[in-house]
Amino acid sequence: MRNLREVLEDADRKNIAIGHFNISELGMLNAIAEVARELMVPVIIGTSEGEREFIDTREAAALVKTLREEHDQEIFLNADHTHSLDKIKEAVEAGYDAVLFDGGKLPMEENLRQTKEVVEYVRSRSEEIVVEGELGYIGSGSTIRKEIPKGAAIKPEDLTTPEEAAKFAEETSIDLLAPAVGNIHGMFANAPEPALDIDRTRAVRMAAKVPLVLHGGSGNTDADFLLAIDAGVRIIHISTELRAAWREGMEKSLKEKPEEIAPYKLMGPALDEMKKVVYNRLKLFNKLH
């Protein structure tokens, strides 16, 4: 079976993107894995520091490994938005396929220093583990928001520049770069997301010479996603859409079965709603018709 590095190289050749979905409980994982198997495409499961604290870093790795082995499935696990070397080490020791060191809020030189330290550590443990760095702050948390997060890079002058990307990628030796190109974590309740800066995305990819990761993908238009993929994005993160689908399904189930107390008997509608999100996103990202 291919490792994640090989899958990314294949995605680059085919000019498609791998879907990345965050989980915080078993139902989410099973829904994502089932749809990816149905479509026969690779998929990445993400767990942030908070999600890893809830489900446990090693347990998450064991669950994904079991799915991979039982179904011969290209399903991978990423330590999403990790803010310290110690937490990176926990994920590497647990058997994660990828790690993201998120120094997006740090000054450039400090972000460089810490990201380089993470890369050196991970390389000393395994050449197969993919290391991602973040350049530019795009907010935090998969939430339904009423306004743009304070400090998020949304104005043209605040976005990641090609010059910064080139310097960052070269000095850190990262495998993947998560830039700020108009993307924001979370999604608006009743408004479309700001349009992505596709020209900036393409310029950053050419300068960095590594594949790009689009964080905060929830709520962006299909057209923007396809343009971003053509501009060099190879992984797209979807989390808020999945959480909103879970919430919608659970509310429907609780309304329809007010007397039910068995969790697994209430999960059906939530799983169905999440599968719809995953199906539509994976089909789009892989350009399946």
Image: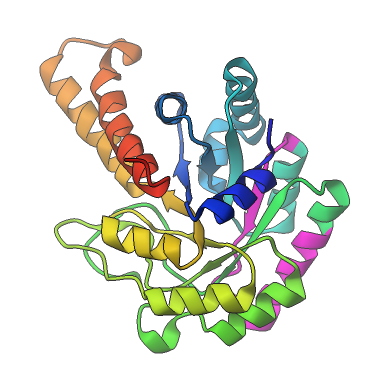
Compared with residue 235, is residue 172 higher up or lower down, i.e. above or below? below
Which image quarter is the N terminus in? top right
Residue 49: % across, % down: 57, 48
In the depicted view, which residue is nearer to us: 217 or 233? 233
Residue 151: % across, % down: 41, 77
**Residue pictured at 36% horizontal, 65% vertical:** 227
Compared with residue 174, is residue 9 higher up or lower down, i.e. above or below? above
Residue 252: % across, % down: 15, 26
Left or right, residue 230 beside residue 96: left
Answer yes or no: is residue 55 visible.
yes
Which span of residues is magenta-colored?
94-120
Number of labelled discs? 0
Is 241 a magenta residue?
A: no
Residue 15: % across, % down: 49, 56
**Residue pictured at 27% horizontal, 18% vertical:** 268
**Residue pictured at 29% horizontal, 11% vertical:** 265
Which image quarter is the C terminus in? top left
**Residue pictured at 46% horizontal, 35% vertical:** 24
Left or right, residue 54 beside residue 83: left
Is 110 a magenta residue?
A: yes
